[in-house]
Amino acid sequence: MAELVLALDVPRATEAFALLDRLPALRWVKVGPILMTREGPTVVRDLIDRGLKVFLDLKWHDIPNTVSGAVTAARELGVGMATVHALGGGRMLEAAAAAAGEDLALVGVTVLTSHDPSSYAQTLGRSGVDLNAEVARLAGMAMDAGLRGVVCSPGEVSLLRKRLGTSPYIVVPGIRRGADALGDQVRVASAEDATRNGATHLVIGRPLLQAADPGALLEDLMKESRCAAP
Ligand code: C5P
């Protein structure tokens, strides 16, 4: 079974809370740069006060001292999970893991789900790249540095579960059903497939944010994510 995490990619806290009123079964929400930049830490405190677990997804990628300070601030705010970019390097990841302590589950972003092999190769200035190998390499770095888990696309979940063993978190955005618009996501899968392959947390934004009946969709997704991992 995987946890469902609603990505609150909306411009205002009022909009987020109106949607949450319709989703009483939800336990996890993700606050990213859109809501955090507009509303600041108050929105995180208000979500925690409502009994929700907050995943702060600001994907820090900076020098070790700066990232360590940001992780400390997130831990003190009561955040349950947060992201750093594995590409920040071993020293940055180790400093981040040390600052997170036991209370904050820090997960390392491998390759963004909006990349395909050619866009990632272009970003790195290479002529070609094996995306699976790159995701596995970055995930290994994150785990070696002491992080709680990793973020990857649905396409790499089963590979990472085999490589990393049973305990690391594998957080998976890019969840779509057949009829859903992809938006800017490239490497996508259903909640059921991602869960079966070993995801522990499924991040879902636009399909729920744009649903005519978000409560009914959440119920369907919860059923799908209850299937057993292999
Ligand atoms: O709207 P959608 O379901 O595509 O939202 C996915 C969420 O997951 C967004 O908030 C996005 O920032 C986040 N995310 C991602 N790819 C990653 C890490 C996080 O799409 N590798």
Image (cartoon, rainbow, N blue to C red):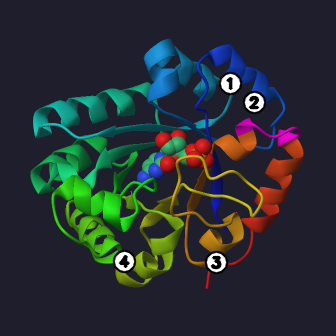
Q: CB under 8 Å between callouts 4 and 2? A: no
Percent coordinates x, y for residue 123 in the rendering: 23, 53
Spatial distance from mark 2 to mark 3, Cα to Cα? 27 Å
Percent coordinates x, y for residue 200 in the rendering: 56, 64
Instruction: Identify the residue at horizontal 48%, vertical 63% (top origin).
Output: 153
Instruction: Specify which label sits upstream in the sequence, 3 or 1.
Output: 1
Tag nearer the camera, 1 or 4: 1
SS at mark 4?
A: helix
Instruction: Specify which label sits upstream in the sequence, 2 or 3.
Output: 2
Instruction: Identify the residue at horizontal 72%, vertical 36% (top origin).
Output: 209
The residue segment tinted magenta is 209-214
Spatial distance from mark 1 to mark 4, Cα to Cα? 35 Å
Badge 4: how crowded within 10 Å, few (<14), some, or many (20+)? some
Instruction: Specify which label sits upstream in the sequence, 1 or 4.
Output: 1
Q: Which mark is residue 16?
A: 1
Q: Main secondary structure of the magenta part?
A: loop
Spatial distance from mark 3 to mark 1, Cα to Cα? 30 Å
Spatial distance from mark 4 to mark 3, Cα to Cα? 16 Å
Q: CB under 8 Å between callouts 2 and 1? A: yes
Badge 2: how crowded within 10 Å, few (<14), some, or many (20+)? many
Spatial distance from mark 2 to mark 1, Cα to Cα? 6 Å
* Residue receiving disc 2: 20
Percent coordinates x, y for residue 67 in the rendering: 21, 36
Amino acid under label 4? Leu
* Residue receiving disc 4: 164
SS at mark 2?
A: helix
* Residue receiving disc 3: 196
Q: Does 89 sit left or right of 96 as displayed? A: left
